[in-house]
Image: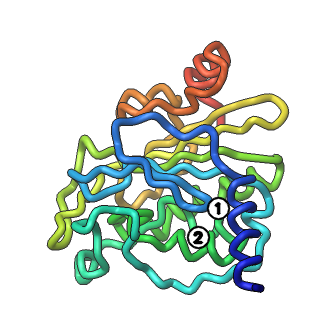
């Protein structure tokens, strides 16, 4: 009985947080409990990962178990752990584990390989980690943030593993803040060691849409969406 009640609670909890601002693309949409993604069969890769953050997501007590595993909702020929072995690339989170502390389900699902991308270790543990932390700092000052993150797959470094997972040359992150004065900010960063300040990688959301072919936050009022996506927010 306890397990049934817990299952019902988690299902209701997930439904309350159901995302409504998912990107629009031609990719297969996979929905997990607290994040969704667009999946490219060609690249064996997520083209975007979308998640809605509130402070309970970063203030939870769930712990990392670092158990990386195949996503049961992807194709049978998708990424496996052995693809990353001895590749020289990190299994870089797109939806960060540090932003999924709300409960153990959210934390564990963030370790699906569909949420991973081959990242240069210096990038993954450097500026990418710094940007993920910056988003959490912004969230501490706001009620909600909507985040979309992913690779630019039109330009790649190569592939890894038997399944030939694409190694992106660049990554993007797009953030919409609906709290108070609504605003958006976007970044495009190269998949390499970065010494420069993050402010140098700020771009408009329109620029990310142009380079990915993905439509972000189209559910917003057209005038608001067009204005916010054209702006480049000062750092």
Q: Earlier in the sequence, mark 1 or mark 2?
A: 2
Q: Residue 36: percent from the left, percent from the top?
A: 52, 53
Q: Which secondary structure, mark 2?
A: helix
The location of residue 169, given as percent across then percent down, is: 29, 51
Compared with residue 218, is residue 138 higher up or lower down, i.e. above or below?
A: below
* Residue 10 vertical position relative to residue 217 in the rendered view, above or below: below
To which quarter of the image does residue 100 belong?
A: bottom right
Q: Is residue 155 left or right of residue 211?
A: left
| Pair 1/2: label in front | 2
**Rendered position, 164 above or below 30:** below
Quick one: 17 or 170, which is closer to the camera?
A: 17
Helix, strand, or loop for circle 1?
helix
Mark 2 lies on residue = 97
Position of 162 with respect to 65 (left or right) is left
Point out residue 54 in the picture as x, y percentages from the top left corner. 76, 54
- Residue appearing at x 76%, y 85% in the figure: 1
- Contact between labelled residues 2 and 1, with CB atoms less than 8 Å apart: no
Q: Residue furthest top?
A: 223
The picture places residue 38, in percent across and down from the top left corner, at 41, 48
Q: Residue at x 68, y 64 (%)?
A: 11
Instruction: Please give the name of the residue rendered at 60% of the width and 47% of the height, measured from the top-left corner.
Output: 147
| Residue bearing mark 1 | 133
Q: Is residue 20 left or right of residue 32?
A: right
- Image quadrant assignment for residue 134: bottom right
Q: Quadrant of the C terminus?
A: top right
Nearer to the camera, 69 or 209 = 69
Q: Residue 4: which numbered mark, if any?
A: none
């Amino acid at each position: 009985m306890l397990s049934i009640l817990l299952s019902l609670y988690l299902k209701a909890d997930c439904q309350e947080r159901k995302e409504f601002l998912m990107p629009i693309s031609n990719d297969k949409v996979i929905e997990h409990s607290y994040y969704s993604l667009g999946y490219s069969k060609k690249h064996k890769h997520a083209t975007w990962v979308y998640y809605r953050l509130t402070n309970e997501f970063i203030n939870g007590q769930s712990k990392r178990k670092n158990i990386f595993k195949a996503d049961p909702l992807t194709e049978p020929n998708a990424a496996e752990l052995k693809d990353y072995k001895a590749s020289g690339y990190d299994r870089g989170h797109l939806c960060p584990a540090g932003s999924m502390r709300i409960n153990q389900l959210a934390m564990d699902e963030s370790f699906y390989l569909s949420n991973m991308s081959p990242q240069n270790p210096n990038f993954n543990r450097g500026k990418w980690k710094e940007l993920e932390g910056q988003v959490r700092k912004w969230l501490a000052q706001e009620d909600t943030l909507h985040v979309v993150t992913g690779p630019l797959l039109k330009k790649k470094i190569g592939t890894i593993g038997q399944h030939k997972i694409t190694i992106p040359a660049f990554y993007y992150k797009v953030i919409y803040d609906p709290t108070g004065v609504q605003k958006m900010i976007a970044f495009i960063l190269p998949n390499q060691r970065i010494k420069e300040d993050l402010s140098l990688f700020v771009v408009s959301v329109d620029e990310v849409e142009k380079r990915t072919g993905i439509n972000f936050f189209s559910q917003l009022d057209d005038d608001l969406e067009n204005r916010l996506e054209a702006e480049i927010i000062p750092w």
